[in-house]
């Protein structure tokens, strides 16, 4: 007897429906075909133990499980439940005609309990797209799948519950969620707030500019100056996630298995801070079964690289292309997978190995040439993709004990949102450009026009401060963002002057 159940395979951030065909016939042996990995081949032992524990029998004849289409690689233990139910139906121990109505996924424990799986959100989206009535899956994954409307999400705790539901002996109410209501209630709620930071007004201003224009930032300063504290609060001043961005972000975290049990829609912008010992693959994604890396987990949010020069040079260099293209393409012999990676990069570093070069009170103990060698660990091409270079100085005692409340993140975010709206109107006819930071060089010349006085100021600054040629476009982009924050139609001299001061590392002899 031939039985068909339906599962799903996740590749990248998208899912593909898998037809699981089970035939029980004369002969002996258990065979799984259709490019399964070892975890699927081992499903025989888990399925057999679960069937016996729940009082069913494993056929002692020939069992063939075919996973179609056969040219797509299937991985993981999430096919245990559809394989088990297919065997029960093919051996006439399960009497139902409802198998074709549902996509079924779940890992079986030896006692028939179900364990949660990864990638549920793209699976649910694909199931609805292909017209399935619903999705049968482990209870812990139900809330995540319920983000998708018009799909019956049936949560089950054991294989027996799935059997009883399919045979009509057990009524299980589909899990429902008012996604938009939940999103509106929880969106834009951050634990950290700019009001927590006393002093550092110039750094807060730089981060506001960065958030308004989508610019990347590097902060240079001694230990304890507040670089990490400020970086952690950057997501709280970015514009609130819209529903489309929230779904994109949740899909990536679902595929990576980072949502946890009973999780639902991600409602705040991600903040990822990998350790400097991270590998190339962990940062950009990949592996034998390609998974999203930290830069994709930071999609629509912030990637924070603390102690930038301590990262391996190869790790930093692989970020150059994603910073330009806003996506990562992982190519393998038989497939090519693309992960989105539209993030803001914020990096921090000490000015030297001891940390106290240019410190107002403490003396630097680094030898001659050591400071420049330390700064040279960060390559020019990477710095070229960072628009704002900000020097962070320690907070004074008077600033730390200031009792006057600092400005809240919500107040800063309101100004940032207004500036982003101006940019959205400006780039309305360019679907791939959403902020000033994404403007190509030719567009910079057209949009960031400056008058003769501005041109003279910029020429003087570049000559006197020893700014490199690559700083030119960056200064104009940042000046355009400052003008947007000020609701100015054109770039004016004060906007240009403020933008010039955010190019510390481009100055010749900065560490001299």
Image (cartoon, rainbow, N blue to C red):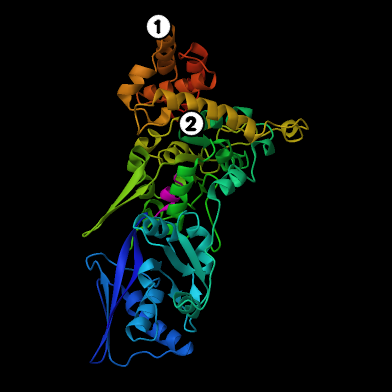
The residue at the far right in this view is 403
Residue 102 coordinates in the image, percent (x, y): 39, 67
Cα separation, mark 2 vs mark 1, equals 26 Å
Q: Residues within 10 Å of mark 2 (few under 14, many from 20)?
A: many
Q: Nearer the viewer, residue 490 or 453?
A: 490
Residue 297: say if magenta.
Answer: yes
Secondary element type, mark 1:
helix
Q: In the rendered structure, which segment of residues is drawn in magenta? A: 292-299
Looking at the picture, does residue 41 appear above or below residue 226?
Answer: below
The answer to whether residue 50 shows anywhere in this view is yes
Secondary element type, mark 2:
strand
Q: Nearer the viewer, residue 292 or 366?
A: 292
The answer to whether residue 117 shows anywhere in this view is no
Quarter of the figure that contains the N terminus: bottom left
Looking at the picture, does residue 378 appear above or below residue 91?
Answer: above
Looking at the picture, does residue 251 appear above or below residue 216?
Answer: below
Residue 276: say if magenta.
Answer: no
**Number of marks present in the image shown:** 2
Residue 446 coordinates in the image, percent (x, y): 34, 17
Q: Nearer the viewer, mark 2 or mark 1?
A: 1
Residue 330 coordinates in the image, percent (x, y): 29, 53
Q: Nearer the viewer, residue 495 or 367?
A: 495
The image quadrant of residue 126 is: bottom left
Residue visible at 52% across and 76% down in the picture = 170
Looking at the picture, does residue 427 appear above or below residue 108?
Answer: above
Name the residue carrying label 2.
389
Which labelled disc corresponds to residue 452? 1
Relative placement, left or right, of 406 versus 466 is right
Relative placement, left or right, of 220 versus 65 is right
């Amino acid at each position: 007897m031939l039985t068909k159940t339906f599962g799903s395979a996740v590749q990248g951030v998208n899912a593909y429906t898998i037809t699981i065909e089970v035939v029980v016939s004369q002969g002996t042996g258990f065979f799984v075909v259709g490019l399964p990995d070892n975890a699927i081949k081992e499903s025989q032992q888990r399925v057999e133990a679960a069937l016996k524990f729940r009082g069913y029998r494993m056929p002692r004849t020939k069992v063939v499980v075919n996973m179609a289409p056969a040219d797509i690689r299937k991985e993981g233990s999430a096919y245990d439940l559809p394989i088990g139910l297919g065997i029960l139906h093919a051996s006439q121990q399960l009497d139902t005609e409802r198998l074709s109505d549902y996509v079924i996924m779940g890992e079986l424990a030896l006692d028939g309990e179900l364990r949660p799986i990864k990638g549920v959100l793209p699976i649910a989206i694909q199931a609805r797209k292909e017209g399935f009535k619903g999705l049968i899956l482990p209870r812990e994954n139900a809330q995540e799948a319920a983000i998708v409307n018009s799909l019956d999400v049936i949560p089950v705790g054991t294989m027996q519950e799935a059997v009883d539901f399919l045979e009509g002996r057990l009524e299980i109410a589909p899990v429902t969620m008012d996604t938009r209501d939940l999103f509106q209630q929880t969106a834009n709620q951050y634990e950290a707030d700019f009001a927590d930071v006393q002093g550092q007004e110039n750094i807060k201003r730089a981060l506001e500019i960065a958030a308004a224009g989508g610019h990347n930032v590097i902060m240079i300063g001694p230990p304890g100056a507040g670089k990490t504290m400020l970086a952690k609060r950057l997501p709280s001043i970015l514009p609130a996630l819209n529903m489309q961005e929230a779904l994109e972000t949740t899909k990536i975290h679902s595929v990576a298995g980072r949502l946890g049990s009973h999780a639902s829609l991600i409602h705040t912008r991600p903040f990822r801070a990998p350790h400097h010992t991270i590998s190339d693959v962990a940062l950009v994604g990949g592996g034998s079964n390609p998974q999203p890396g930290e830069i994709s987990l930071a999609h629509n949010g912030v990637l924070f690289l603390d102690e930038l020069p301590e990262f391996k040079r190869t790790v930093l260099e692989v970020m150059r292309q994603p910073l330009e293209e806003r996506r990562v393409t992982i190519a393998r012999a038989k497939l090519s997978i693309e992960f989105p990676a539209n993030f803001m990069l914020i990096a921090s570093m000490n000015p030297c190995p001891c940390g106290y070069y240019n410190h107002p009170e403490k003396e630097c103990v680094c030898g001659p040439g050591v400071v420049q060698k330390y700064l040279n660990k960060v390559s020019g091409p990477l710095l070229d993709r960072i628009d704002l270079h900000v020097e962070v100085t320690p907070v004074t005692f008077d600033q730390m004990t200031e009792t006057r409340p600092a400005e809240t993140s919500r107040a800063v975010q309101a100004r940032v949102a207004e500036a982003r709206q101006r940019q959205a109107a400006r780039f309305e006819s360019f679907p791939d450009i959403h902020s000033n930071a994404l403007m190509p060089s030719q567009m910079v010349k057209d949009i960031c026009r400056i008058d003769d006085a501005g041109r003279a100021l910029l020429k003087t600054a570049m000559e006197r401060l020893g700014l490199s040629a690559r700083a030119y476009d960056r200064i104009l982009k940042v000046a355009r963002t400052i003008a947007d924050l000020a609701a100015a139609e054109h770039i004016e001299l004060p906007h240009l002057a403020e933008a010039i001061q955010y190019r510390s590392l481009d100055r010749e002899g900065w560490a001299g």
